[in-house]
Image (spheres, rainbow, N blue to C red):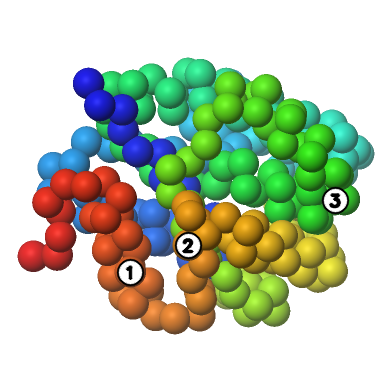
């Protein structure tokens, strides 16, 4: 059986990545393309428990190195229990965040050396890399306005200041510029429909099946 495609959706909080993932899932479902959706941190029972630990605002005492290792622990479980088995069954996987989030948040945001993060991530994932990554880029101020508009309480990472999130945004942009072969940087200020149309076109091209617009 031909392995499926691993496709990730990235960007700062409020960028619209989850909306686009859900629209992409609807597009594939309508065309009978086998796939699953999942998220990071999370996706499995153990990884979701780690997610709660990482993001709970009551856990302010978590130090940066502990945060990093918790993310990687959740990813290791996620990859081995859910992502790899789905890919090996020939299913595509649409994932809300993956390794690029670690490089952006813990690398650019927290200041950990990227070379070390690459080695640690490779250990956690067994070298698994997405075949296609969509990054939705928006100004941090707009992202914060959107989050306020949602009326959702900020989690532990969202409580970091503007300078932190500016570094995260720059981390995403830098990764997209360095890996144009598999990363697509979108202007997240564009309309939902415009972005969804481009995502669908890229999915059709990558998956290689006759799933073009009807």
Give the position of the N terminus as an image quadrant. Answer: top left
In the drawing, does residue 95 fall left or right of residue 60?
left
Q: Label 2, on which residue?
A: 184
Percent of width and height locating residue 114: 79, 44
- Does the image show residue 47? no
Circle 3 is placed at which residue position? 110
Q: Which residue is mark 1?
A: 198
Q: Is residue 80 above or below residue 135?
A: above
Using the numbered discs, state the Cα–Cα distance from disc 1 to disc 3 in whole angstroms.
32 Å
Q: Residue at x 22, y 36 (%)?
A: 34
Instruction: Please tell me how crowded label 2 is: few (under 14), some (14-19), or many (20+) other residues with Cα within 10 Å.
Output: some
Q: Of label 3 and label 2, which has the lower sequence position?
A: 3
Say which element carries label 2: strand
Q: Position of residue 48 (x, y in %)?
A: 57, 30
User: Judging from the image, what secondary structure is the residue with disc 1 in?
Assistant: helix
Contact between marks 3 and 2 (CB within 8 A): the answer is no
Residue 53: quadrant of the picture: top right
């Amino acid at each position: 059986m031909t392995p499926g495609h691993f496709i990730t959706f990235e960007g700062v909080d409020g960028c619209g990545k989850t909306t686009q993932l859900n629209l992409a899932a609807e597009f594939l479902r309508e065309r009978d393309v086998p796939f699953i959706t999942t998220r990071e941190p999370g996706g499995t029972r153990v990884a979701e428990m780690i997610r709660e630990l990482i993001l709970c605002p009551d856990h302010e005492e978590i130090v940066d190195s502990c945060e990093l290792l918790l993310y990687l622990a959740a990813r290791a479980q996620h990859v081995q229990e859910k992502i790899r088995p789905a890919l090996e069954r020939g299913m595509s996987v649409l994932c809300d965040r993956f390794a690029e989030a670690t490089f952006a948040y813990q690398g650019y945001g927290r200041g950990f050396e990227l070379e070390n993060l690459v080695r640690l991530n490779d250990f956690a994932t067994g070298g698994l890399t997405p075949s296609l990554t969509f990054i939705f880029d928006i100004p941090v101020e707009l992202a914060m306005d959107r989050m306020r508009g949602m009326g959702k309480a900020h989690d532990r990472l969202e409580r970091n200041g503007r300078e932190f999130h500016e570094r995260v945004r720059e981390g995403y942009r830098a990764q997209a510029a360095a890996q144009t072969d598999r990363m697509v940087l979108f202007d997240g200020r564009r309309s939902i429909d415009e972005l969804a149309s481009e995502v669908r076109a890229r999915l059709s091209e990558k998956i290689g099946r006759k799933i073009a617009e009807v």
